[in-house]
Image: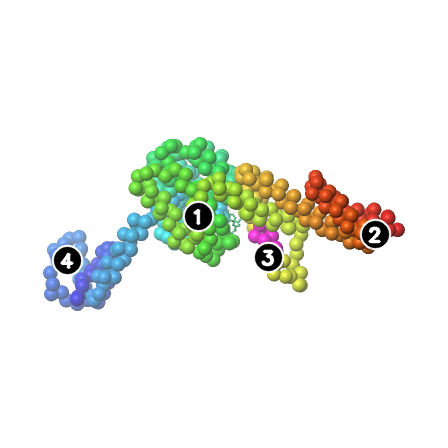
């Protein structure tokens, strides 16, 4: 079947959804195109015929319609490393992005195809569907206190991607107008761990407050879909549960990374695989700001307990090591019988008050000398 298309000559726009092709004379009437000889608006319209152009155009038309129906206007507050990292993927999913940050990131934003606003008033006047907080944990409350919510549409969806969850949840509930929807999320990855792919990486979310209207439910789902389509492992859990798990995993990871950095691990010519893992851990933790680490500690109520557990675990390991060492010395000095008695006493002491028993090395040496 021969299908029709049209082009207009220089200085004019191509007609929407019509393709270019080679010219052939037209025996058919064209009810949907203006007659070039009669129309003053299309002075030099040329009519062309092509094969099989229409299905292609129809497809692209459908695609455009699909993108329009699934695309969101997302305003990102905080356009540092993490905000930029997320934007790249959001853009691939054809969402429209607006950004605001204290620092002027207009050049980076331009390069990415994101509209940058140095004033949040201007961004909010664009009426984003979603406002995404990608701020540091420490600056979040100060920012929320200053935002001109009145410039937004009445039921805007607020989302955060902070590494702690109860804290932003409570701030949202405190500062956002009651009509706004709230989705708290935590992508358990970042610019380093998610640089090649997000496939299989956990994405935690809690629909804290989503209105019942279909459009609001759909808007939230469209946002979550970005991560689902990237292959993330979608984990719905309460903010409280998240913080409990994250203190025992992410916070402990960052702590160990920082401890080892202070300790001064260095590559050697005979690195084991395990040691390389430690070196990588230090590298990864170094890449994250101390503000992030401090935020993980200060704004997750489970973090202190985990720090204390780490301390206790370290002491316990020391005790185990020095306990054995002590046994070896006693055995050398007093033989097996004495050793058995000592073993019993020693383990009772350990179990008793759990306090650290200093290795009696000096005593042993003195006794032996
Ligand atoms: O990939 C990175 O760059 C990260 O540091 C990601 C990392 C982490 O691994 O702790 C840091 C912050 C986010 O909350 C999630 C994960």
Give yes or no for residue 284 being in the magenta stretch: yes
**Nearer-the-camera pick, 273 or 348:** 348
Left or right? Give the position of 50 relative to 215: left
* Residue at image point 21% right, 61% down: 54
Circle 2 residue: 334
Name the residue furthest right.
Answer: 369
Q: Are marks 4 and 3 in contact (CB under 8 Å)?
A: no
Decide which of tag 2 and tag 1 comes sooner along the chain: 1
Task: State the SS at label 4.
Answer: loop
Residue 295, label in figure: none
Left or right? Give the position of 40 relative to 118: left
Name the image quarter holding residue 294: top right
Colouring: rainbow
Circle 1 residue: 235
Looking at the rendered image, the disc whose residue lies closer to the viewer, 1 or 4, is: 1
Looking at the rendered image, the disc whose residue lies closer to the viewer, 4 or 2, is: 2
State the separation of the CA atoms marked 4 and 3: 72 Å
Q: Which residues are magenta?
A: 276-286
Name the spot of residue 29 as percent of width and height, x first.
11, 60
Label 3 environment density (alpha carbons within 10 Å; few <14, some 14–19, many ≥20): few
Q: Cβ(mark 3) to ligand 1 < 8 Å? A: no
Secondary structure character of the magenta stretch overall? helix
């Amino acid at each position: 079947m021969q299908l029709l298309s049209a082009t207009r000559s220089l200085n004019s726009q191509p007609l929407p959804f019509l393709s270019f092709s080679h010219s052939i004379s037209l025996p058919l009437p064209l009810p949907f195109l203006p007659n070039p000889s009669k129309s003053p608006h299309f002075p030099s319209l040329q009519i062309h015929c092509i094969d099989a152009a229409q299905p292609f155009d129809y497809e692209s038309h459908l695609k455009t319609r699909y993108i329009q129906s699934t695309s969101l206007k997302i305003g990102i507050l905080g356009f540092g490393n993490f905000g930029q990292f997320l934007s790249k993927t959001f853009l691939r999913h054809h969402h429209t992005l607006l950004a605001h940050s204290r620092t002027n990131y207009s050049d980076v934003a331009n390069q990415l195809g994101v509209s940058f606003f140095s004033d949040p008033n201007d961004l909010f006047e664009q009426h984003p569907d979603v406002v995404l907080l990608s701020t540091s944990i420490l600056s979040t409350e100060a920012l929320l206190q200053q935002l001109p919510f009145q410039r937004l549409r009445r039921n805007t969806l607020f989302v955060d991607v902070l590494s702690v969850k109860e804290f932003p949840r409570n701030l949202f509930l405190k500062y956002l107008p009651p009509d706004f929807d709230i989705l708290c999320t935590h992508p358990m990855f970042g610019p380093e761990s998610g640089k090649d792919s997000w496939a299989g990486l956990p994405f935690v979310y809690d629909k804290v407050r989503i209105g019942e209207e279909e459009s609001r439910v759909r808007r939230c789902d469209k946002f979550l879909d970005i991560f689902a389509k990237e292959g993330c492992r979608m984990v719905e859990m309460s903010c409280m549960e998240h913080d409990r798990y994250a203190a025992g995993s992410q916070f402990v990871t960052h702590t160990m990374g920082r401890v080892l950095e202070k300790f001064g691990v260095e590559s050697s010519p005979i690195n084991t695989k395990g040691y390389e893992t430690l070196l990588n851990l230090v590298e990864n933790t170094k890449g994250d700001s101390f503000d992030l680490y401090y935020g993980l500690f200060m704004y997750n109520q489970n973090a202190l307990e985990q720090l204390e557990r780490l301390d206790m675990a370290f002491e316990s390991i020391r005790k185990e090591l020095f306990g054995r060492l002590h046994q070896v010395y006693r055995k050398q000095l007093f033989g097996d019988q004495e050793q058995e008695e000592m073993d019993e006493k020693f383990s009772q002491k350990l179990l008793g008050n759990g306090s650290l028993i200093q290795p009696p090395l000096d005593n042993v040496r003195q006794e032996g000398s």
